[in-house]
Amino acid sequence: MTTTGAQRLTSRRADEVIFRRGAVPVTTARFLAEVAALAVRLPDEGPVLNFCADRYLALVAFAAALSRGQVTLLSADRSAPRLADIARGHGARYALSDTDAVLPVPVIRPDASPGDAGPNPAIPEDAVAAISFTSGSTGEPQPHAKPWGALVSGARAAAQRFRVTGATSILGTVPAQHMYGFETTVMMPLHGGGAGHAGSVFYPSDIAEALALLPAPRLLVTTPLQMRALLGSQVALPAMAGVISATAPLAAELAGEAEVAWGAPVREIYGATEAGSIASRRTLDGEVWEPYPGMRFEIDSGGARVTVPGLPTPVPLSDRLEWVGEGRFRLQGRLADMVKLAGKRASLAGLTRILTGIDGVEDGVFVAPDDLDVNPRARLAAAVVAPRLDAEAVVAALRSKVEPAFLPRPVVMVPALPRDAVGKVSRAAIAALAWKR
Amino acid sequence: MTTTLSLEAEVARLIVDALHLETAPEEIDPAAPLFGDGLGLDSIDALEIALAVSRRYGFQLRSDDERNHRIFASLRALSAHIEKNRAA
């Protein structure tokens, strides 16, 4: 075991505001007191499944568990069946949440009650603070351990990159349990800067109202899908200092519209659940990504890997990368089999295996549309050979096995899969059938 | 309540068109959940429906309270919410 250092729970000054619950500002001192008060209420053993919807409660719950030496399980998918899978499969002893779900473990409701002053504990950098999950190609959630040191250095790198000062208000529209949301809206106030917004916001009008109540400078942490909805619904937003987008590629056109409408630079984060955030760019400046400080990329014919400060081994990436000089890179496209929708990844081959495993399905294949990487509304399609079933029955059978984001639209029922001259399934022919409309 | 019935059909059509669903509008069970086990919609769809509703009916959906679960509980609940909040 190597000797590493330790990092305090937070590096913010005691009197700095690190979160806002509605109109109530929460200082570091008050946060630490609330963490200490919750920590004594927790059971003796973790791991703990944290699915709080309120971002501040998610932070307090994470910090209280961490201060007790317990690992937090973070699932971006907060549906009850997925949470139950993770609780069972990864040995959760209990859950902390402000929302209701029936789970195979006890669910404790955290509260934020101001107690006496609390300590700011030192946490070993190599201690696993959280485990985040990707959906994985077979539908089985895949765990990725996050050592405390990696989370802290990621938060500092992000704050530096996006020039987040102590006074920046951070409004997140992505769940605290998604790796991007966790790093940018939960870890950043602890170790980078800024004050997070506690409430959960999702629809355009929620976002507009929450932003209006926050003091400037305001930073919006969101997704291409929500940017599109915001622009489409034409709600008025107050002045912003910046917009950060991740979970899916942002089309330059949408970024351009947003910069004009909101008068703020729109930046994108490139990352993955396994590695966290690793690079960023201002979308309108072009396709070149600038790695976060301290990241080491290796790019060769076998693919790309990144060595992340605080992570024990290099992380393989599911995109093809190309150097463009000065330590910057360009994405040349994803590895053909991997698709990303609604911030979740899956393998087309894995989805196809699930499809062909359905009772009554003789043959079938999932295909991705050509605009998958630029159209936030894009969906997968499937061609299916199943003489006894109709498209609706196929979707119904898939529903219990794959996440909703990956359900095919449309499903094309065919007497046989179209094949090319050498007998290979023709993706082009299926695409033509699926997207002829 | 003929208004509600025809609005339900209209909203069903709106959902199917906005989301490119396989289901025919008249086959959506007005009492079944739109998300999860029912129609199997997800958060992308929720935003898409919110956008379509704001364009067609001139008001914004919001998620500030418990109501939201009720609004999206079913086609019937969503239609009733639209009936109550639509502009003019």
Image: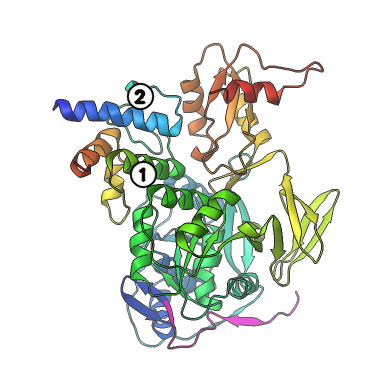
Question: Element at badge 1?
Answer: helix
Question: Element at badge 2?
Answer: helix
User: How many numbered marks, from 0 up?
Assistant: 2
Q: Residue at x 61, y 39 (%)?
A: A372
**Magenta: predominant secondary structure element?**
loop
Q: Is residue A141 magenta?
A: no
Residue at the limit of the structure toward the right, as seen here: A301
In three-dimensional space, the C-alpha distance between marks 2 and 1, rounded to whole angstroms, equals 18 Å
Say which chain tag 2 marks: B
Q: x%, y% of residue A154?
A: 63, 70
> Which stretch appears magenta?
A1-18
Q: Amino acid at mark 1?
A: Ala
N-term-proximal mark, 2 vs 1: 2
Same chain for the residues under marks 2 and 1 in the image: yes
Nearer to us in this view, A169 or A57: A169
Answer yes or no: is residue A109 visible: no
- Quadrant of the rendered structure where residue B73 is? top left
- Name the side, left or right, on which A336 lies relative to A19: right
Q: Amino acid at mark 2?
A: Pro
Task: Point out which mark residue A290 bears.
Answer: none
- Name the side, left or right, on which A294 lies relative to A362: right
Mark 2 is surrounded, within 10 Å at the Cα level, by few (under 14), some (14 to 19) or many (20 or more) other residues, namely some
Residue at the disc numbered 2: B25
Q: x%, y% of residue A11?
A: 54, 83
Q: Is residue B84 above or below residue A395?
A: below
Mark 1 is surrounded, within 10 Å at the Cα level, by few (under 14), some (14 to 19) or many (20 or more) other residues, namely many
Which quadrant is home to the N terminus of chain A?
bottom right
Residue at the disc numbered 1: B50
Q: Is residue A5 magenta?
A: yes
Nearer to us in this view, A322 or B64: A322
